[in-house]
Amino acid sequence: MVGVGVTIIGAGVVGLAVARELGFCSEQVLVLEKESAPGKGISSRNSEVVHAGIYYPEGSLKAALCVEGSAMLRAYCAKTGVPLKKIGKVIVAASRKEEQALEDLCRKGTANGARDLRMLSGKELKKREPNVRGVCALFSPHTGIIDSHRLVRSLEIQCLAQGAAILYRTTLFAVEKAASGFTCRARGPGGEPYSFASRVVINAAGLDADEVASLAGIDVDASGCRIYPVKGEYFRVGAAKQGLVSGLVYPVPKRNLMGLGVHATKDLSGSLRLGPNALPAKSRSYEVDPSHAQAFFESARQMLPFLEPADLAPDMAGIRPKIQRPGEPVKDFVVRHEAGQGLAGMINLIGIESPGLTSCLSLGRYVADMVRKSGLAS
Ligand SMILES: Cc1cc2nc3c(=O)[nH]c(=O)nc-3n(C[C@H](O)[C@H](O)[C@H](O)COP(=O)(O)OP(=O)(O)OC[C@H]3O[C@@H](n4cnc5c(N)ncnc54)[C@H](O)[C@@H]3O)c2cc1C
């Protein structure tokens, strides 16, 4: 049977960033991707915000990898020309009651390592965002936006240049522990199944990461890794009003909310979008229900009083790979070498929701360190 050193499942930003970091490997790195091109999953359906690391619990992987990842992304983009713009973000208190929550966020973010956070008075907020309504705000000057599609392409090119092989339209459908590593079974573009040996298997399968883990025999319920997908829709604001906001505008997040709350994001072309909402995803449909426009309008009009219902048009949607049920406390990223489960050589990345785009390069480095330190590859 043919064999490779490391097999990575998934050519999203995370799988590609891991493959790129494994450039040091003397062994063949293989990436399997079921779609026809990279980044067609979660990586191309998100807010494209490079987060500063404000929200996540102190000591969590999300906090550490977000702060490290945003710095790594800035350096990467400066070097490769992938567009990234630091446009800043305000988290806006709608009432005095929310001011305390913002101050808590400011302390939490600063403890996490988010740089230069500061509170803005109502007057300072007006100066920065004259068309945004709020009694005060938390300002994060280093939050930015990135072209996620260009990032995916750039990572793909770097992986290929380092000698990694990427097989598109190829789905992994079985993994079995073997004496030294794993026997993997995949189906290629023609639908023909074949087997190969791999010493290491890294699961970066996004929304299917729980399924891939269970192919190897992991009990995803017992290990708290079942994915409960949550859809997030976006609505676009008409061109005439997109210049009324200059940076990113977020509400104060509610406790145990499934997302950060409907916020206003800009993309690199200057377009203004509202979203994402958070709805349990019953299927992989990315359609946006136009009847949700009113709810978007209601959530956003307190912060953005210039909006009218007719300004909103359905845009796009993404699906979050959450590993907690609605209403349960937010869980951290799972990045685990499964040696304890009798699967030495398998690393699972599960629940890589936001800030996974921001953290892709730091996740790549984290996994490569795990591979190195566990002696899985040199
Ligand atoms: C609505 C929304 C907004 C977000 N906003 C932000 C944000 O502003 N900032 C931020 O930092 N993060 C954000 N995120 C999170 C971020 O987009 C993700 O964390 C990140 O893109 C995850 O990348 P990935 O590579 O893990 O997953 P994916 O991009 O989904 O890649 C996984 C790949 O695995 C492939 N695959 C699955 N199963 C198999 C198999 N059996 N065989 C072969 N291939 C397989 C899939 O086809 C897919 O291409 C957001 C997410 C959503 C949903």
Image (cartoon, rainbow, N blue to C red):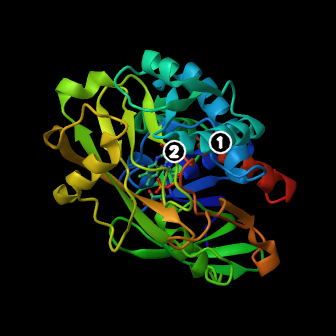
* Left or right, 314 with reference to 67: left
Q: Secondary structure at mark 2?
A: loop
> In the picture, residue 266 is in which quadrant?
top left
Relative image position of residue 290 (x, y in whole percent)? 17, 56
Q: Are marks 1 and 2 in contact (CB under 8 Å)?
A: yes
> In the picture, residue 346 is in which quadrant?
bottom right
Viewer-side residue, 228 vs 111:
111
Residue 141 visible: no
Q: Residues within 10 Å of mark 1 (few under 14, many from 20)?
A: many
**Three-letter amino acid code at the position of disc 1:** Leu
* Mark number displayed over residue 252: 2
Q: Is the CB of mark 2 within 8 Å of ligand 1?
A: no
Q: Residue furthest front?
A: 96
Q: Is the CB of mark 1 within 8 Å of ligand 1?
A: no
The residue depicted at 85 percent of the width and 59 percent of the height is 374
Q: Secondary structure at mark 1?
A: helix
Viewer-side residue, 16 vs 331:
331
* Left or right, 347 with reference to 241: right
Relative image position of residue 159 (x, y in whole percent)? 57, 41
Nearer-N-terminus badge (1/2)? 1
Q: Give the CA separation, mark 1 to mark 2.
A: 9 Å
Viewer-side residue, 115 vs 70:
115
Residue 363 visible: yes
Relative image position of residue 208 (x, y in whole percent)? 49, 69
* Mark number displayed over residue 105: 1
Question: How many marks can you see?
Answer: 2
**Three-letter amino acid code at the position of disc 2:** Val
